[in-house]
Image (spheres, helix red, strand yellow):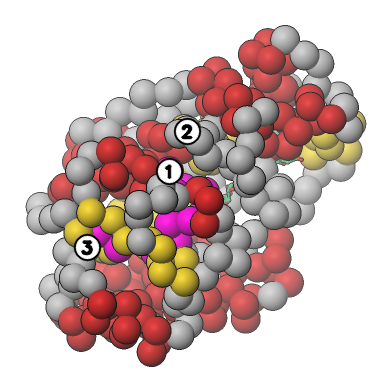
């Protein structure tokens, strides 16, 4: 399985995966609507097709132009808050767009897909660490849209023999190669901490009254290069395994702990403002990752210091 279409390959996790696949000898084509993606983030010798998932005709042309053994599908809108305000946008792009993709795959006979899912499909956890058997009750349309797609993939397996892996990411962070995390707007903690250290504008810490040792929320930050590696491993296992896998380190860090580590790593002060809770934030999210160990032999290589070191380095060596 060497010829891979990476849909959404110009985005943050997508572009890191593209570099990783290229380094490992895969033939990659990237498709991206470039709404949030960056053409500069992918290697110059990788073909980039400007295609939107909603455009079924363009998808047909894409699959007629190339021969693919498998698809990795990153192309989703992913702002939780926006999904609550504009659910139509999320269901249309994420769900209808994926149906378009699966339809063209079915027509041309591409039977392998690795899909970007999320821990947001679990909703408010009943227990931690969260394993794959944890009930799924998403609390926003973004999480709902991802859960719907997981169910669609399972039904397509039963009916059409689709081979699929849905990777439920916890908090992707860090950077590699010459890419940095670059969302517009940026809402994620680690890039915002790096930005505050650089420009001296304080970062808001959303809530200090959570039921955690220091009162701030706990998350499981996983290095984007470890995620990239997991996508390759998932491709390689598709013949033997279809289903869902958590991708997290199993280690939770609080917002305050992240600030302390960032100050240590950079040797600079991070200005902060303590403010009210952000709506929709869970107190504590971290993964049980035993299944990914067993099935993919995936063991995250990088810890939180490396994640923040790399995020900081690329914040200061930005190309775009
Ligand atoms: N935080 C702050 N200040 C900020 C930004 C974030 O205190 O300026 C806090 C948040 O309240 C949260 C933690 O830092 O407690 C992490 O927030 P992020 O926005 O970095 O990440 P989330 O955990 O909210 O979101 C991630 C993914 C989403 C996914 C979600 C599932 O980015 O795609 O986990 O809960 F849907």
Whether residues under marks 2 and 1 lie with C-beta atoms below 8 angstroms apart, the answer is yes
Whole-number angstrom distance, CA of label 3 to CA of label 1: 18 Å
Mark earlier in primary sequence (2, 1): 1
Q: Position of residue 88 (x, y in %)?
A: 62, 81
* Residue closer to the observer: 145 or 239: 239
Whole-number angstrom distance, CA of label 2 to CA of label 1: 7 Å
Residue 7: say if magenta. Answer: yes
Q: Is residue 26 above or below residue 299?
A: below
Whole-number angstrom distance, CA of label 3 to CA of label 2: 24 Å
Q: Is residue 160 left or right of residue 10?
A: left
Identified at 26% across, 69% down, the residue is 154
Is disc 2's CB within 8 Å of ligand 1? no
SS at mark 3 in the image: strand
Q: Is residue 262 left or right of residue 224?
A: right
Q: Is residue 249 left or right of residue 261?
A: left
- The label on residue 176 is 2
Q: Quadrant of ligand 1?
A: top right
**Mark whose residue sits in front, 3 or 2:** 2
Residue furthest bottom in the image: 57
Mark 1 nearby-residue class (10 Å; few <14, some 14–19, many ≥20): many
Q: Position of residue 167 (x, y in %)?
A: 36, 51
Q: How many marks?
A: 3
Mark earlier in primary sequence (3, 2): 3
Identified at 60% across, 61% down, the residue is 36
Mark 2 nearby-residue class (10 Å; few <14, some 14–19, many ≥20): some
- The label on residue 16 is 1
Task: Residue under label 3, please give it.
Answer: 70
| Magenta segment boundaries in residue numbering | 4-16
- The image quadrant of residue 291 is top left
């Amino acid at each position: 399985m060497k010829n891979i279409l990476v849909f959404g390959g110009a985005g943050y996790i997508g572009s890191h995966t593209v570099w990783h696949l290229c380094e490992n000898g895969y033939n990659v084509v990237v498709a991206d609507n470039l709404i949030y993606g960056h053409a500069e983030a992918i290697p110059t010798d990788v073909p980039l097709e400007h295609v939107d998932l909603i455009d079924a005709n363009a998808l047909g042309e894409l699959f007629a132009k190339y021969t693919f053994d498998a698809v990795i599908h990153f192309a989703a809108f992913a702002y939780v808050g926006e999904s609550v305000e504009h659910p139509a946008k999320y269901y249309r792009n994420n769900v209808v767009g994926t149906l378009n993709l699966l339809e063209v795959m079915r027509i041309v006979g591409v039977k392998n897909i690795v899909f970007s899912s999320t821990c947001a499909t679990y909703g408010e956890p009943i227990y931690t660490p969260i394993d794959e058997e944890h009930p799924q009750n998403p609390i926003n349309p973004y999480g709902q849209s991802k859960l719907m797609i997981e169910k669609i993939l399972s039904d397509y397996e039963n009916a059409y023999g689709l081979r699929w892996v849905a990777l439920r990411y916890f908090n992707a962070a860090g950077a590699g190669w010459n890419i940095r995390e670059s969302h517009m707007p940026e809402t994620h903690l680690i890039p915002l901490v790096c930005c505050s250290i650089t420009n001296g504008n304080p970062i808001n810490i959303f809530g200090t009254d959570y039921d955690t040792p220091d009162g701030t929320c706990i998350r499981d930050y996983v290095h984007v290069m470890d995620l990239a590696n997991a996508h390759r491993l998932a491709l390689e296992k598709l013949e033997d395994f279809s289903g869902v896998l958590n991708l997290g380190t199993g280690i939770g860090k609080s917002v305050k702990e992240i600030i302390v580590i960032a100050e240590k790593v950079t040797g600079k002060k991070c200005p902060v403002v303590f403010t009210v809770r952000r709506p929709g934030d869970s107190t504590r999210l971290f993964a049980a990752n035993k299944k990914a160990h067993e099935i993919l032999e995936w063991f995250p290589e990088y810890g939180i210091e490396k994640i923040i070191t790399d995020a900081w380095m690329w914040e200061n060596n930005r190309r775009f």
